Amino acid sequence: MSLKPEDVKNIAHLARLAISDDSISDYARDLSSILDLVEQMNQVNTDHVQPMAHPMDAQQRLRPDAVTEINQREKFQSIAPDVDSGLYRVPKVIE
């Protein structure tokens, strides 16, 4: 796909980018080559390719899901400006 200088100007305007007139032809060439590469990649047959989350089949090391702190609810609610039935009350923000 070949982009014209007008296309690059329009894309730059939509993206709110300032591009000098000197470099528009360079951008048009570079963007056209990127779009050509994407088109080549779209032509590849991937029917029998399994989707994967990571190319190295790596597993995330996770810590055990265990409680590590004591319950301090009463302590924190004792200094709160407004508490009702164990819940923090806040001023109404949506009318």
Image (tube, rainbow, N blue to C red):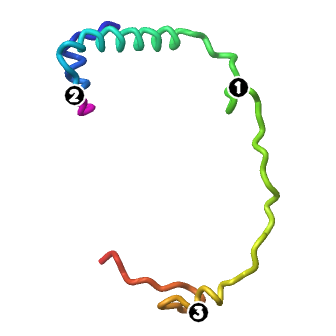
Q: Main secondary structure of the magenta part?
A: loop
Judge left or right: residue 32 versus residue 12.
right
Query: Which residue was labeled with disc 2?
Result: 18
The image position of residue 15, as x and y in percent, is 27, 32
Q: Give residue 5's quadrant in the image.
A: top left
The image position of residue 59, as x and y in percent, is 78, 38
The image position of residue 61, as x and y in percent, is 79, 45
First along the sequence among labels 2 and 1: 2
Judge the density around disc 2: few (<14), some (14-19), many (≥20) Cα neighbours within 10 Å.
few
- Residue 59 vs 36, above or below: the answer is below
Q: CA distance from mark 2 to mark 3?
A: 55 Å
- Residue 23 vs 11, above or below: the answer is above
Query: Which residue was labeled with disc 1?
Result: 55
Residue 14 included in the magenta stretch of the image? yes
Q: Give residue 60's quadrant in the image.
A: top right
Query: Which residue was labeled with disc 3?
Result: 78
First along the sequence among labels 2 and 3: 2
Residue found 69% across the figure and 16% down from its top: 48
- Image quarter in which the C terminus is found: bottom left
Judge left or right: residue 61 versus residue 72.
right
